[in-house]
Amino acid sequence: MSVRSRVAFATGVAAAVGAALLLSGRFEGSVVLALLLAFSIRTASLAALVDAGPILAADALRGLRGRVWLAPVWTLTAAAAVARAGSPELDGLRGANAVAGSALAYGPVITVAGSWLALGAAILALITWVELGAETAGAAPGRVEAPSPVRMLDAIGVLAEAALVVTLFLGPQIVDGPEAAWWVGGMIPLAAAAWYARRVRLPDIAYLPALPASLAAVGLGLVLVGGAP
Protein backbone atom coordinates (compact mmCIF):
# COMPACT_ATOMS: atom_id res chain seq x y z
CA MET A 1 0.00 0.00 0.00
CA SER A 2 1.20 3.51 -0.79
CA VAL A 3 1.41 6.29 1.76
CA ARG A 4 -1.81 7.74 0.37
CA SER A 5 -3.63 4.43 0.76
CA ARG A 6 -2.35 3.98 4.30
CA VAL A 7 -3.57 7.47 5.24
CA ALA A 8 -7.00 6.71 3.74
CA PHE A 9 -7.23 3.45 5.66
CA ALA A 10 -6.15 5.08 8.94
CA THR A 11 -8.75 7.80 8.37
CA GLY A 12 -11.46 5.17 8.02
CA VAL A 13 -10.37 3.41 11.21
CA ALA A 14 -10.42 6.69 13.14
CA ALA A 15 -13.86 7.49 11.73
CA ALA A 16 -15.10 4.05 12.80
CA VAL A 17 -13.95 4.62 16.39
CA GLY A 18 -15.48 8.09 16.52
CA ALA A 19 -18.77 6.95 14.99
CA ALA A 20 -19.04 4.06 17.46
CA LEU A 21 -18.50 6.36 20.43
CA LEU A 22 -21.07 8.89 19.20
CA LEU A 23 -23.75 6.47 18.08
CA SER A 24 -23.50 4.43 21.27
CA GLY A 25 -24.01 7.56 23.37
CA ARG A 26 -20.54 7.52 24.93
CA PHE A 27 -19.91 11.10 23.88
CA GLU A 28 -22.16 13.97 22.94
CA GLY A 29 -22.08 15.31 19.41
CA SER A 30 -24.19 16.63 16.59
CA VAL A 31 -26.02 14.62 13.95
CA VAL A 32 -23.75 16.27 11.37
CA LEU A 33 -20.62 14.91 13.07
CA ALA A 34 -22.10 11.42 13.40
CA LEU A 35 -23.09 11.48 9.71
CA LEU A 36 -19.64 12.66 8.65
CA LEU A 37 -17.87 9.93 10.62
CA ALA A 38 -20.21 7.12 9.55
CA PHE A 39 -20.06 8.19 5.89
CA SER A 40 -16.25 8.44 5.97
CA ILE A 41 -15.68 4.79 6.88
CA ARG A 42 -16.81 3.19 3.63
CA THR A 43 -15.44 6.10 1.63
CA ALA A 44 -12.01 5.60 3.19
CA SER A 45 -12.07 1.86 2.52
CA LEU A 46 -12.55 2.60 -1.18
CA ALA A 47 -9.91 5.33 -1.19
CA ALA A 48 -7.41 2.87 0.28
CA LEU A 49 -7.60 0.87 -2.98
CA VAL A 50 -7.05 3.62 -5.54
CA ASP A 51 -3.40 2.58 -5.86
CA ALA A 52 -4.15 -1.14 -6.10
CA GLY A 53 -4.11 -3.21 -9.28
CA PRO A 54 -6.25 -2.25 -12.28
CA ILE A 55 -9.30 -4.30 -11.25
CA LEU A 56 -9.46 -3.09 -7.66
CA ALA A 57 -8.58 0.48 -8.60
CA ALA A 58 -11.39 0.56 -11.17
CA ASP A 59 -13.87 -0.76 -8.60
CA ALA A 60 -12.64 1.75 -6.03
CA LEU A 61 -13.04 4.70 -8.39
CA ARG A 62 -16.52 3.52 -9.36
CA GLY A 63 -17.40 3.24 -5.69
CA LEU A 64 -16.02 6.69 -4.90
CA ARG A 65 -18.16 8.19 -7.67
CA GLY A 66 -21.14 6.49 -6.05
CA ARG A 67 -20.23 7.96 -2.66
CA VAL A 68 -20.21 11.43 -4.20
CA TRP A 69 -23.75 10.88 -5.49
CA LEU A 70 -24.90 9.52 -2.14
CA ALA A 71 -23.53 12.34 0.02
CA PRO A 72 -26.53 14.65 -0.65
CA VAL A 73 -28.90 11.75 0.03
CA TRP A 74 -27.47 11.18 3.49
CA THR A 75 -27.48 14.94 4.16
CA LEU A 76 -31.17 15.32 3.26
CA THR A 77 -32.06 12.21 5.24
CA ALA A 78 -30.31 13.50 8.35
CA ALA A 79 -31.97 16.90 7.88
CA ALA A 80 -35.38 15.22 7.85
CA ALA A 81 -34.62 13.40 11.09
CA VAL A 82 -33.35 16.60 12.72
CA ALA A 83 -36.44 18.55 11.62
CA ARG A 84 -38.70 15.84 13.02
CA ALA A 85 -36.84 15.70 16.34
CA GLY A 86 -36.43 19.47 16.64
CA SER A 87 -32.78 19.15 17.68
CA PRO A 88 -29.50 18.93 15.73
CA GLU A 89 -27.80 17.14 18.63
CA LEU A 90 -27.55 13.38 18.63
CA ASP A 91 -28.70 13.14 22.24
CA GLY A 92 -31.65 15.39 21.50
CA LEU A 93 -32.64 13.26 18.54
CA ARG A 94 -32.43 10.03 20.53
CA GLY A 95 -34.37 11.70 23.31
CA ALA A 96 -37.10 12.74 20.89
CA ASN A 97 -37.43 9.17 19.66
CA ALA A 98 -37.59 7.97 23.26
CA VAL A 99 -40.17 10.52 24.41
CA ALA A 100 -42.19 11.37 21.30
CA GLY A 101 -41.98 7.85 19.89
CA SER A 102 -40.54 6.34 16.74
CA ALA A 103 -40.37 8.78 13.85
CA LEU A 104 -42.04 6.13 11.69
CA ALA A 105 -45.12 5.71 13.89
CA TYR A 106 -45.81 8.85 15.92
CA GLY A 107 -46.57 12.43 15.03
CA PRO A 108 -48.67 14.18 12.37
CA VAL A 109 -49.56 12.04 9.37
CA ILE A 110 -47.56 14.24 7.00
CA THR A 111 -44.52 14.07 9.27
CA VAL A 112 -44.72 10.28 9.54
CA ALA A 113 -45.04 9.98 5.75
CA GLY A 114 -41.98 12.18 5.32
CA SER A 115 -40.04 10.06 7.79
CA TRP A 116 -40.86 6.90 5.85
CA LEU A 117 -39.69 8.47 2.59
CA ALA A 118 -36.46 9.65 4.21
CA LEU A 119 -35.95 6.15 5.62
CA GLY A 120 -36.42 4.67 2.15
CA ALA A 121 -33.77 7.01 0.77
CA ALA A 122 -31.40 6.06 3.58
CA ILE A 123 -31.92 2.35 2.90
CA LEU A 124 -31.11 2.85 -0.80
CA ALA A 125 -27.95 4.67 0.22
CA LEU A 126 -27.08 1.92 2.70
CA ILE A 127 -27.45 -1.03 0.34
CA THR A 128 -25.31 0.57 -2.37
CA TRP A 129 -22.22 -1.58 -1.99
CA VAL A 130 -19.53 -2.04 -4.63
CA GLU A 131 -18.21 -5.58 -4.98
CA LEU A 132 -14.44 -5.20 -4.74
CA GLY A 133 -12.59 -7.59 -7.00
CA ALA A 134 -13.52 -9.78 -9.93
CA GLU A 135 -12.76 -13.07 -11.62
CA THR A 136 -9.75 -12.99 -13.94
CA ALA A 137 -9.12 -15.06 -17.02
CA GLY A 138 -6.12 -15.93 -19.16
CA ALA A 139 -2.84 -17.35 -18.03
CA ALA A 140 -3.55 -16.83 -14.32
CA PRO A 141 -7.25 -17.40 -13.70
CA GLY A 142 -8.60 -16.70 -10.24
CA ARG A 143 -10.18 -13.99 -8.20
CA VAL A 144 -8.68 -10.62 -7.34
CA GLU A 145 -9.90 -9.59 -3.90
CA ALA A 146 -9.37 -6.57 -1.74
CA PRO A 147 -7.11 -7.06 1.29
CA SER A 148 -8.92 -8.50 4.29
CA PRO A 149 -8.49 -5.37 6.49
CA VAL A 150 -10.06 -3.21 3.76
CA ARG A 151 -13.03 -5.55 3.37
CA MET A 152 -13.47 -5.62 7.14
CA LEU A 153 -13.39 -1.82 7.29
CA ASP A 154 -16.01 -1.72 4.53
CA ALA A 155 -18.25 -4.05 6.56
CA ILE A 156 -17.77 -1.92 9.67
CA GLY A 157 -18.85 1.07 7.60
CA VAL A 158 -22.08 -0.69 6.67
CA LEU A 159 -22.79 -1.41 10.33
CA ALA A 160 -22.08 2.22 11.24
CA GLU A 161 -24.46 3.49 8.57
CA ALA A 162 -27.12 1.01 9.69
CA ALA A 163 -26.65 2.23 13.26
CA LEU A 164 -27.01 5.81 12.05
CA VAL A 165 -30.29 5.02 10.29
CA VAL A 166 -31.67 3.36 13.42
CA THR A 167 -30.56 6.32 15.53
CA LEU A 168 -32.16 8.81 13.16
CA PHE A 169 -35.58 7.17 12.97
CA LEU A 170 -35.96 4.39 15.53
CA GLY A 171 -33.46 4.30 18.34
CA PRO A 172 -34.31 5.64 21.78
CA GLN A 173 -31.78 6.60 24.44
CA ILE A 174 -29.66 3.56 25.26
CA VAL A 175 -29.87 3.54 29.03
CA ASP A 176 -30.85 -0.05 29.76
CA GLY A 177 -30.84 -3.54 28.31
CA PRO A 178 -34.26 -3.55 26.61
CA GLU A 179 -33.56 -0.29 24.78
CA ALA A 180 -30.15 -1.52 23.63
CA ALA A 181 -31.71 -4.76 22.36
CA TRP A 182 -34.39 -2.81 20.50
CA TRP A 183 -31.75 -0.57 18.94
CA VAL A 184 -29.54 -3.48 17.88
CA GLY A 185 -32.61 -5.29 16.56
CA GLY A 186 -33.24 -2.41 14.21
CA MET A 187 -29.74 -2.76 12.80
CA ILE A 188 -29.98 -6.46 11.98
CA PRO A 189 -32.45 -6.28 9.03
CA LEU A 190 -30.69 -3.20 7.62
CA ALA A 191 -27.27 -4.87 7.70
CA ALA A 192 -28.78 -8.06 6.28
CA ALA A 193 -30.37 -6.11 3.41
CA ALA A 194 -27.03 -4.46 2.63
CA TRP A 195 -25.25 -7.82 2.67
CA TYR A 196 -27.87 -9.42 0.39
CA ALA A 197 -27.67 -6.46 -2.00
CA ARG A 198 -23.93 -7.01 -2.23
CA ARG A 199 -24.45 -10.64 -3.21
CA VAL A 200 -27.00 -9.97 -5.95
CA ARG A 201 -25.04 -7.01 -7.36
CA LEU A 202 -27.76 -4.41 -7.65
CA PRO A 203 -27.82 -2.38 -10.87
CA ASP A 204 -26.21 1.02 -10.90
CA ILE A 205 -29.60 2.73 -10.46
CA ALA A 206 -28.70 3.08 -6.79
CA TYR A 207 -25.92 5.40 -7.86
CA LEU A 208 -28.22 7.70 -9.78
CA PRO A 209 -28.98 10.77 -7.67
CA ALA A 210 -32.56 11.12 -8.89
CA LEU A 211 -34.29 8.29 -7.02
CA PRO A 212 -32.84 8.34 -3.48
CA ALA A 213 -32.25 12.11 -3.52
CA SER A 214 -35.84 12.74 -4.61
CA LEU A 215 -37.18 10.50 -1.85
CA ALA A 216 -35.02 12.27 0.73
CA ALA A 217 -35.95 15.75 -0.54
CA VAL A 218 -39.69 15.03 -0.55
CA GLY A 219 -39.39 13.41 2.85
CA LEU A 220 -37.65 16.47 4.27
CA GLY A 221 -40.29 18.74 2.74
CA LEU A 222 -43.13 16.75 4.29
CA VAL A 223 -41.47 16.74 7.70
CA LEU A 224 -41.01 20.51 7.53
CA VAL A 225 -44.67 20.96 6.59
CA GLY A 226 -45.96 18.49 9.17
CA GLY A 227 -43.72 19.69 11.97
CA ALA A 228 -42.33 17.87 14.99
CA PRO A 229 -44.62 15.77 17.23
Image (cartoon, grey):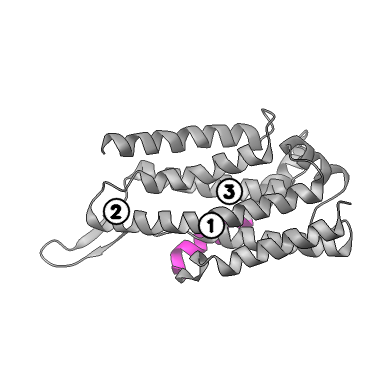
Q: Amino acid at mark 2?
A: Ala
Residue 132 visible, this angle = no
Q: Is residue 201 above or below residue 17?
A: below
Residue bounds of the magenta highlight: 189-202
**Foreground mark, 2 or 3?**
2
Question: Which is more toward the observer, 122 or 148?
Answer: 122
* Amino acid bearing label 1: Leu
Dot 1 corresponds to which residue?
Answer: 70
Describe the element under mark 2 as helix, strand or loop.
helix
Q: Earlier in the sequence, mark 3 or mark 1?
A: 1
User: Is 141 placed above or below 18 here?
Assistant: below
**Residue ID for mark 2:** 57
- Residue 88 visible in the current orientation: yes
Position of residue 31 in the picture relative to residue 127 (left or right): right
**Residue at left offset 77%, top offset 42%:** 93
Q: Position of residue 188 (x, y in %)?
A: 62, 53
Q: CA distance from mark 3 to mark 1?
A: 12 Å
- Cα distance between the residues tagged 2 and 3: 24 Å
Q: Quadrant of residue 136?
A: bottom left
Tell me which secondary structure the magenta stretch mostly adopts: helix
Q: Is residue 200 magenta?
A: yes
Q: Is 144 positioned to the left or the right of 205 in the image?
A: left
Residue 183 on image: x %, y %: 71, 45
Q: In the rendering, which numbered label is found on residue 52?
A: none
In the rendered structure, does residue 195 fall within the stretch colored magenta?
Answer: yes
Q: Nearer the viewer, mark 1 or mark 2?
A: 1
Q: Which residue is mark 3?
A: 161
